[in-house]
Image (tube, helix red, strand yellow):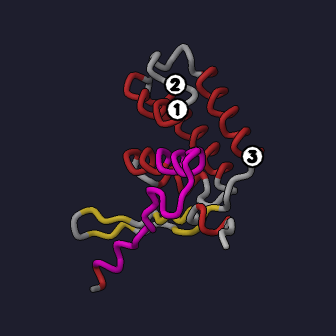
Amino acid sequence: MAAFSAESVAEELGYTFTYKVGDKVIPGPSGVIDEPTDRQIAKFLTGVKKVVKESEDKLPSTADPANPASVTDALDDLNPEDVVSLMGKMAQLYADLCSGSPSKAEILALPMRRRQAFYAWLQQEVMSPEAGPGAGRARPSSPLRAVAG
């Protein structure tokens, strides 16, 4: 008999912030993000729109509030202090969406390219209308395993 199983619709939101640069392993936290609630998602989207609105005169027109990753992509034209402020605000929004795991500090500890990739991945996973078992989800693997082997 066919049955619906919420567990089989989407995999957990596992992450690891450990990565390698050459032979050097850069340690970072890992864990599983609690599935965001509708309220968290709404607060996140509202927060992104607010950050864009506050920075409207500083951000280029390519920054689309509906696409938080485009906001971070638009940073090249900003004054460095504005970038630091905007990055802090965005990291807090993502940390809140993740119920604090990872935290704002842990997110900001990632280099910008890796942080932007995390943002894009999380946004795709959480806001994609197409759920499916393993739908584009690779379990994060620890570079430590590759080094230890």
State the mark number for residue 38.
3
Instruction: For marks 3 and 1, give the CA distance.
Output: 18 Å
Residue type for callout 2: Asp
Viewport quadrant of the N terminus? bottom right
**Residue that label 2 marks:** 64
Picture coordinates of residue 35, whole percent (x, y)? 67, 58
Which segment did they paint magenta? 119-146
Q: Quadrant of residue 139?
A: bottom left
* Cβ–Cβ under 8 Å for marks 2 and 1: yes
* Cβ–Cβ under 8 Å for marks 3 and 2: no
Residue type for callout 3: Asp
Picture coordinates of residue 12, whole percent (x, y)? 58, 65
Number of callouts: 3
Magenta stretch holds residue 72: no
Q: Nearer the viewer, residue 100 or 7?
A: 7
- Helix, strand, or loop for circle 2? loop
> What residue is rendered at 70% in x and 32% in y?
46
Instruction: For marks 2 and 1, give the CA distance.
Output: 5 Å
Residue lying furthest left: 22
Picture coordinates of residue 56, whole percent (x, y)? 56, 17
Q: Does label 3 or label 1 sit earlier along the sequence?
A: 3
> What residue is rendered at 60% in x and 62% in y?
9
Q: Quadrant of residue 145?
A: bottom left
**Residue that label 1 marks:** 67
State the mark number for residue 134.
none
Instruction: For marks 3 and 2, give the CA distance.
Output: 21 Å
Left or right: where does residue 148 sit relative to residue 47? Answer: left
Q: Give the vertical position of 76 relative to 143 (above or below).
A: above
